[in-house]
Image (cartoon, rainbow, N blue to C red):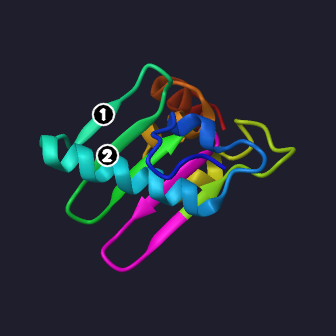
Amino acid sequence: MNNNNEVLPFDELNKPGIDLNQVIHQAQKMQTIFRQMGVTEAKFDTGTRYESTPEKTTVTGDGVMVQMRQHTTAVIFRNEGSSEKDAIPEIRQIATQKDAAAFSNLTQPSISRIENND
């Protein structure tokens, strides 16, 4: 297990053996740092996405999403054996196209095309 102070790329947190608490801790660290900087939305070169609204903060990477609200935190992993595209309809029930793209390692226009072709 990694040192609690170590900052890991968020998209690396969906690997076998990663502790659920570590995923939450990493998302909370990102939230704290970005709030201090006044950042409400960010996209990383890795495809990881951060967005904070008055209702919730969402951090999404390839196959992992954390949504933090005032009283609850939800962590979503793509199931083993499911492809990036398999999870899109379920993720879209709770997240934006941008978040679905980050979760599926695709672009937002790709998500739009997939949805319009179904």
At a point 26% along the width and 39% down the height, the residue shown is: 41
Residue type, numbered disc 2: Glu
**Residue with the mark numbered 1:** 42
At a point 30% along the width and 33% down the height, the residue shown is: 42
Q: Which residues are magenta?
A: 63-74
Left or right: residue 85 compared with residue 46: right
Percent x, y of residue 49: 41, 37
For the question of whether residue 110 can be seen, the reply is yes
Number of disc labels: 2
Q: Nearer the viewer, residue 109 or 83?
A: 83
Q: Nearer the viewer, residue 112 or 96?
A: 96
Percent x, y of residue 35: 19, 49
Q: Nearer the viewer, residue 82 or 67?
A: 67
Residue that protrudes farthest toward the right in the picture: 81
Q: Determine the secondary structure under disc 1.
A: strand
Left or right: residue 107 compared with residue 82: left
Give residue 51's mark.
Answer: 2
Residue type, numbered disc 1: Ala
State the CA–CA distance, disc 1 to disc 2: 7 Å
Closer to the chain start, of discs 1 and 2, is: 1
Give residue 28's mark.
Answer: none
At a point 31% along the width and 62% down the height, the residue shown is: 56
Q: Any magenta on residue 66?
A: yes
- Whether tag 1 and tag 2 are in contact, CB under 8 A, the answer is yes
Q: Nearer the viewer, residue 79 or 32?
A: 32
Left or right: residue 97 compared with residue 85: left
